[in-house]
Image (tube, rainbow, N blue to C red):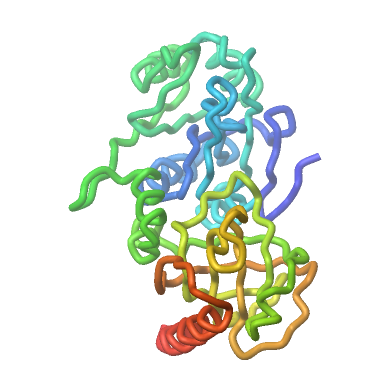
């Protein structure tokens, strides 16, 4: 069955038909992506549908884990307000990768999804060995009597609008640039799991978050952030540490830890939604726990002041 989060998240065989579909990964849903999607929601001859591959083709073909700015479960809530009625994920495997561009068009887009209109970005590629491009799809669609929309690559004063630029901004901890590119704040979520309790011992109890492994996270460091608990609309000012623990355990893997400022709430088992606002500093190793605790206090003061004016 389709799972629901404002709009259905479906496999191709569960989709509502016929479709008016936008084809691509649309990771980050930047302005260029939204223009592609807009062309399938206006006077649509079928159900406005976004169609993506899952997992990313590079994961299947090359074992290259592709972290996502928006996981499918997050993307459904973003697509609904744009007029999209369903998100269809095509399971990508070696059999699909072996299909020619023409076979993929005929079997999946025409056959299974009954496309009446197709929209893509100008750099879209498909079919075995990426043999098909925008012009290939245009020719196939026109021969089949299907409407086709090809959106030129959108540029701003710094160059091409792209998911890579958003990732680069996040990697540098530049949340403002990422927000400008996406047209919305960057957020992620995770479940609070039991930690070692060391933060509590030094006076700064933290919630340890278990985040989906395919989610792209910002660069390592200490951040001022907002936190929402479960589905509650109230947000809490927060200090977040993203990365290893150089003072407590230098050999530990990267972790996401949050401390809700001026709160005493048992968060274990809760689902937290985090919106990092600004990176306060890079991580560093302190001589002892006392020095670490003092620095966290300074971080908390700076975050509290910053967020009160945000």
Rendered-image quadrant of the C terminus: bottom left
Q: Which residue does the image show at 40% across and 71% down from the upper left?
A: 281
Q: Which residue does the image show at 35% across and 55% down from the upper left?
A: 169
Q: Is residue 152 left or right of residue 167?
A: left
Q: Which residue does the image show at 69% across and 74% down from the upper left?
A: 198
Viewer-proximal residue among 258 and 174 = 258
- Quadrant assignment, res 148: top left
Viewer-proximal residue among 209 and 121 = 209
Image coordinates for residue 59, horizontal then vertical, percent: 57, 28
Q: Is residue 189 left or right of residue 27?
A: right
Q: Is residue 251 left or right of residue 306?
A: right
Image coordinates for residue 300, horizontal then vertical, percent: 50, 84
Q: Which residue does the image show at 61% across and 78% down from the upper left?
A: 259
Q: Is residue 176 left or right of residue 214?
A: left
Rendered-image quadrant of the N terminus: top right
Q: How many marks?
A: 0
Image: 67 above or below 309: above
Image: 71 above or below 199: above
Image coordinates for residue 95, horizontal then vertical, percent: 64, 13
Image: 42 above or below 279: above
- Quadrant assignment, res 143: top left
Image coordinates for residue 239, horizontal then vertical, percent: 54, 77
Viewer-proximal residue among 62 and 253 = 253
Give the residue furthest to the left. Answer: 157
Viewer-proximal residue among 113 and 211 = 211
């Amino acid at each position: 069955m389709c799972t629901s989060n404002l709009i259905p998240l479906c496999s191709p065989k569960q989709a509502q038909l016929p479709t008016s579909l936008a084809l691509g990964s649309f990771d980050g849903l930047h302005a260029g992506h939204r223009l592609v999607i807009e062309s399938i929601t206006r006077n649509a001859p079928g159900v406005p549908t976004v169609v993506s591959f899952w997992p990313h083709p590079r994961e299947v073909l090359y074992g290259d884990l592709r972290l996502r700015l928006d996981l499918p479960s997050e993307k459904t809530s973003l697509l609904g307000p744009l007029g999209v009625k369903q998100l269809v994920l095509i399971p990508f495997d070696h059999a699909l990768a072996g299909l020619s561009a023409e076979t993929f068009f005929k079997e999946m887009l025409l056959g299974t999804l009954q496309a009446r209109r197709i929209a893509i970005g100008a750099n879209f590629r498909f079919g075995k060995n990426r043999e098909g491009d925008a012009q290939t799809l245009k020719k196939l669609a026109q021969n089949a009597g299907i409407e086709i929309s090809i959106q030129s690559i959108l540029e701003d004063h710094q160059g091409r609008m792209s998911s890579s630029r958003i990732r680069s901004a996040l990697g540098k901890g530049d949340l403002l640039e990422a927000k400008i590119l996406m047209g919305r704040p960057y957020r992620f979520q995770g479940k609070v799991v039991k930690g070692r309790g060391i933060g509590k011992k030094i006076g700064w109890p933290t919630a340890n978050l278990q985040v989906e492994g395919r989610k792209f996270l910002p660069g390592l460091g200490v951040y001022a952030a907002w936190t929402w608990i479960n589905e509650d609309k109230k947000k809490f000012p927060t200090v977040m540490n993203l990365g290893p623990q150089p003072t407590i355990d230098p050999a530990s893997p990267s972790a996401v830890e949050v401390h809700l400022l001026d709160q005493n709430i048992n968060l274990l088992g809760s689902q937290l939604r985090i919106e990092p606002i600004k990176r306060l500093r890079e991580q560093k190793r302190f001589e002892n726990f006392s020095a670490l605790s003092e620095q966290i206090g300074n971080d908390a003061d700076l975050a509290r002041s910053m967020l009160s004016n945000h």
